[in-house]
Image (tube, grey):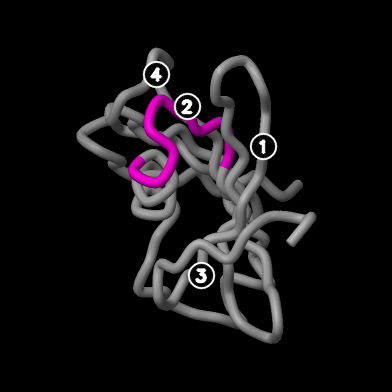
């Protein structure tokens, strides 16, 4: 019987267990947030395809909260756009949920689904 491999990582000083094949974690969302964190989703195939990225999920969340003061990041998901890696970041601001893409190489906000 195959047993899942458990890996623990430290995100912003918090130890977070990860199961191999899934990359869900809670990240510290301390910049202007009323919540304790957000979910990170990383597809293992995209992770392998793009390798290390200059902008990680926590940095992408910080970029979004700087651009939208008062926003609370709910989720950052690794995706691709135009053949390159992006973080699709979902956030709540003033009671409304929205989503933008953050370039995982440059950190530029590319917009959301409606751009």
Q: Earlier in the sequence, mark 4 or mark 3?
A: 4
Q: Earlier in the sequence, mark 3 or mark 1?
A: 1
Under circle 3, the secondary element is: strand
For marks 4 and 3, give the CA distance. 24 Å
Q: Pick the residue in front: 107 or 22.
A: 107
Under circle 1, the secondary element is: strand
For marks 2 and 1, give the CA distance. 10 Å
> Residue 47: within the magenta?
no
- Comparing labels 4 and 2, the label whose residue is closer to the camera: 2
Tell me what residue is drawn at x 50 percent, y 42 percent. 18
Q: Earlier in the sequence, mark 2 or mark 1?
A: 2
Q: Is residue 14 above or below residue 54?
A: above
Q: How far across and down, in percent of the image, does residue 79 sit?
A: 67, 65
> Residues at badges 3 and 1 in contact (C-beta under 8 Å)?
no
Q: Pick the residue in front: 89 or 51.
A: 89
The residue indicated by pointer 2 is 72
Residue furthest to the bottom in view is 83
For marks 4 and 1, give the CA distance. 19 Å
Q: How far across and down, in percent of the image, does residue 13 sit?
A: 20, 34
Q: Earlier in the sequence, mark 3 or mark 2?
A: 2
The residue indicated by pointer 3 is 103
- Magenta extent: 66-75
- Comparing labels 4 and 1, the label whose residue is closer to the camera: 1
Q: Is residue 85 above or below residue 93?
A: below
Which circle marks residue 98 in the picture?
Answer: 1
The residue indicated by pointer 4 is 36
């Amino acid at each position: 019987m195959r047993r899942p491999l458990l890996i623990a990582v430290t995100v912003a000083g918090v130890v977070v267990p990860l199961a191999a094949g899934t990359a869900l974690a809670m990240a510290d969302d301390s910049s202007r947030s009323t919540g304790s964190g957000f979910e990170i989703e990383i597809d293992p195939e995209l992770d392998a395809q793009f390798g290390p990225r200059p902008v990680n999920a926590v940095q992408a969340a910080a970029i979004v909260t700087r651009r939208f003061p008062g926003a609370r990041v709910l989720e950052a998901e690794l995706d691709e756009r135009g053949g390159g890696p992006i973080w699709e970041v979902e956030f709540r601001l003033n009671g409304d949920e929205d989503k933008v893409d953050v370039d995982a190489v440059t950190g530029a906000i590319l917009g959301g689904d409606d751009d």
